[in-house]
């Protein structure tokens, strides 16, 4: 019994040590809503195995410095990884829609330290309050900075929704979200939730 207790203690210590193996630094953001940085940092620290947001005074085997930008109508997501104090690797992915970021991140999961949790894909509906009537069956959802959050999605009126994105503007068949609405949707898309319908009020 004593030996078993010792084994559990050692296992617990090993687990704690492993949990602090990777530190996620604050995400830098360019040409995108500023709030995306905090959303992305939190997503990584919660869904990248053996990681946490960098804590002052703690040492990590790996420290990942993420960056995300919008250039040439595409998201560029990059990770500079340092092992102790030396640059260990640099990886980037490019996608045209935020809804594809999770799938592309999974392609990096075979690396030594980048092990993203498996998140089951979900279909959701989102609700917006538009500034004018909508005359299209399908719309694309973007942020105020112009980045493409989704492809074209079907529009329904006065239906049930899973996520309220608040007030939004309409430009032809493009729905432009507020910064707060963009951050909400960006977070959901990172979690492998795909927008099936947009509910217009």
Image (cartoon, helix red, strand yellow):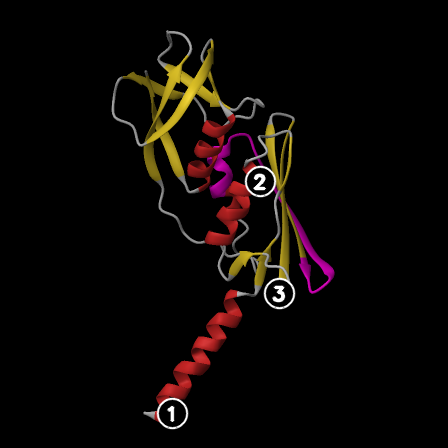
Residue drawn at x 42%, y 19% is 167
Quadrant into which the N terminus falls: bottom left
Residue drawn at x 41%, y 41% is 192
User: Residue 184: which quarter of the image?
Assistant: top left
Q: Which residue is mark 2?
A: 37
Q: CA distance from mark 2 to mark 3?
A: 22 Å
Q: CA distance from mark 1 to mark 2?
A: 46 Å
Rendered image: mark on residue 165: none
Residue neighbourhood size for the residue with mark 2, other residues' Cα within 10 Å, grouped as few (<14), some (14–19), many (≥20): many
Residue neighbourhood size for the residue with mark 1, other residues' Cα within 10 Å, grouped as few (<14), some (14–19), many (≥20): few
Q: Are marks 2 and 3 in contact (CB under 8 Å)?
A: no
Between label 1 and label 3, give the one nearer the viewer: 3
Residue 64 falls left or right of residue 52: right
Confirm whether the magenta stretch covers residue 169: no
Q: Are marks 1 and 2 in contact (CB under 8 Å)?
A: no
Residue 198 falls left or right of residue 97: left
Residue neighbourhood size for the residue with mark 3, other residues' Cα within 10 Å, grouped as few (<14), some (14–19), many (≥20): few
Q: Which residue is mark 1?
A: 3
Q: Earlier in the sequence, mark 2 or mark 3?
A: 2
Q: Residue 30: percent from the left, percent from the top?
A: 65, 33
Q: Which residue is mark 3?
A: 58
Residue at the farthest front position: 56
Residue drawn at x 38%, y 10% is 136
Residue range corresponding to the magenta coloring: 82-103
The answer to whether residue 106 shows anywhere in this view is: no
Secondary structure category for the residue under label 3 = loop
Confirm whether the magenta stretch covers residue 89: yes
The answer to whether residue 26 shows anywhere in this view is: yes
């Amino acid at each position: 019994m004593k030996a078993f207790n010792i084994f559990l203690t050692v296992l617990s210590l090993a687990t704690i040590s492993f949990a602090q193996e990777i530190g996620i630094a604050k995400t830098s953001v360019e040409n995108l809503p500023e709030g995306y940085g905090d959303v992305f940092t939190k997503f990584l620290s919660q869904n990248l195995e053996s990681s946490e947001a960098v804590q002052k005074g703690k040492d990590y085997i790996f420290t990942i410095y993420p960056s995300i930008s919008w250039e040439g109508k595409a998201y560029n997501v990059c990770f500079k990884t340092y092992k102790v104090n030396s640059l260990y690797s640099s990886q980037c992915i490019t996608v045209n829609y935020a809804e594809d970021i999770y799938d592309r991140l999974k392609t990096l999961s075979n690396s030594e330290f980048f092990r993203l949790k498996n998140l089951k894909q979900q279909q959701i509906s989102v609700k917006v309050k538009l500034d004018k009537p909508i005359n299209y069956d399908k719309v694309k959802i973007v942020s105020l900075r112009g980045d493409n959050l989704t492809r074209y999605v079907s529009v329904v009126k006065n239906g049930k929704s899973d996520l309220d994105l608040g007030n939004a503007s309409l430009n032809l068949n493009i729905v432009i979200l507020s910064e707060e609405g963009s951050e909400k949707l960006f977070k959901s898309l990172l979690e492998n939730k795909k927008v099936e319908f947009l509910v217009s009020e």
